[in-house]
Amino acid sequence: MRVLLIGSGGREHALAAALAADESVDALICAPGSPGMAALGECAQVNQNDPAAVASLAVTGAADLVVIGPEAPLVAGVADAVRAKGIPVYGPSREAARIEGSKAFAKEVMAAAGVPTAAARACRTREEAEAALDEFGAPYVVKDDGLAAGKGVVVTEDREAALAHALDCDRVVIEEYLDGPEVSLFVVSDGKSARAMLPAQDYKRVGEDGTGPNTGGMGAYTPLPWAPDDLVEEIMGKVAEPTLAEMASRGIPFVGTLYCGLALTAKGLKVVEFNARFGDPEIQPILALLETPLGELLHAAATGRLADFGPLWWREGAAVCVVIANEGYPIEPVKGRPVYGADEVGVLHAGTAIDASGQLVATGGRVLNCVGTGDSVAQARTEAYARAEGVKLEGSHYRRDIAAGI
Ligand code: AMP
Ligand code: GLY
């Protein structure tokens, strides 16, 4: 089959590598792709958030399957435009992607489906925001209602900072603080049936020991040796299945990845957030362990045939991903500096380009992902950090405590 993969980040590089390794994938077109993805398939220029442009590329590229990596094209309705051409798409419709695009919508779906989550108030005025802050108390959790690439959330003990963020947002959701370890579970859905991937954990703050501002994610590992054996089953039963059933009953079946971001609190598991796509950087280590051919799995989901698809197969052992970020990330990344050591095994491109002189340069806030595997998380971690040490990018930084002590 011919697969068109939309996106250009580390998640898409990992997806491209797994798709290219699938024997049923004869051709891979990455749009817009990246210098790393260019080694795995053809790269095609496209505005990935333009539904008509992506649909026409899918037609001219004779794609049998379109896989949409990031959230912005989903929320823009790219999946709908491709589906309208009769081409199978892995990725939810614009309506279904609201589960990520609007925190208020996600809360409403969870309430209707009886899914445990933090109590929350959608606020529009200063008075409403102040009342919600005082109702829940510190630590305050203040979320921009729209898409913010994981950076629209402020968690703080400081009421003034919490209120300032609330006033900065057009619509804001203020919610109860959830304490306990966080887990990401990616559920592949065809709208009716679902398959869970391995659970993973990511590191959202820029600094070691969880200090500094939130980022899109600075590293991740899978599986979770400390988690209860029935964790995935519990998440499927209490969270994923009721949510997918609620979406289907509203006439907006969810086809794609339901990303369940959860906190394991003293009062049981609760949803922190849903996303409508694979998490980045968690999917990088997860795919390093996937044995099931990814193209076949995503094609089955895109064509409503997951019920007949067997269980997923995983390699024994563990995988760890360490993110190399540009100087200044996440506030104001310095871009355009040369990067060396990026074309090694286990190094994925998350934000790179080739400049006019042919030099590989850093363009994103998150530049590279270094993935290691091993029999244990500790072994995988050693390999990931060895890869990170081989990368040269002036001013770059990475967390030294990814998967430490696991
Ligand atoms: P979100 O964009 O909703 O995933 O939030 C980003 C990050 O903020 C989460 O991964 C958590 O680390 C933190 N966060 C979000 N909501 C809460 C909450 N209710 N309680 C504690 N931490 C939260
Ligand atoms: N790793 C967090 C995210 O993809 O949103």
Image (spheres, rainbow, N blue to C red):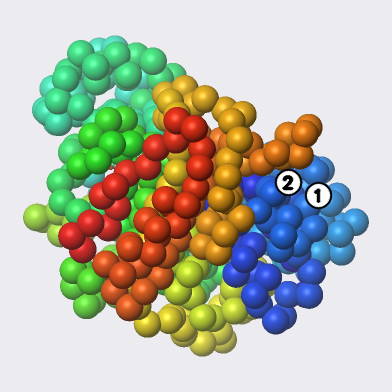
Q: Is residue 336 above or below residue 226?
A: above
- Classify residue 366 as left or right of residue 152: right
The structure residue drawn at horizontal position 45% and vertical position 30%, both measured from the top left corner, is 395
> What kind of element bears circle 2?
strand
Q: Nearer the viewer, residue 45 or 359?
A: 359
Residue at x 26% of width, y 49% of height: 401
Circles 2, 1 touching at the beta carbon (< 8 Å): yes
Q: Can you tell which quarter of the image residue 172 is in?
A: top left
Q: Which residue is mark 2?
A: 32
Q: CA distance from mark 2 to mark 1?
A: 5 Å
Q: What is the x, y in percent for residue 291?
A: 51, 81
Give the camera-side residue of 198 and 64: 198
Q: Where's ligand 1: which quadrant?
A: top left
Work out which residue is located at the far right of the displayed protein and give it.
60
Q: Is residue 313 above or below residue 240?
A: below
Quadrant for the C terminus, please: bottom left
Q: Which badge, 2 or 1, is on the more N-terminal residue?
A: 2
Q: Quadrant of the N terminus?
A: bottom right
Query: Can you identify the residue that label 1 sits on?
Result: 44
Amino acid type indicated by mark 2 = Pro
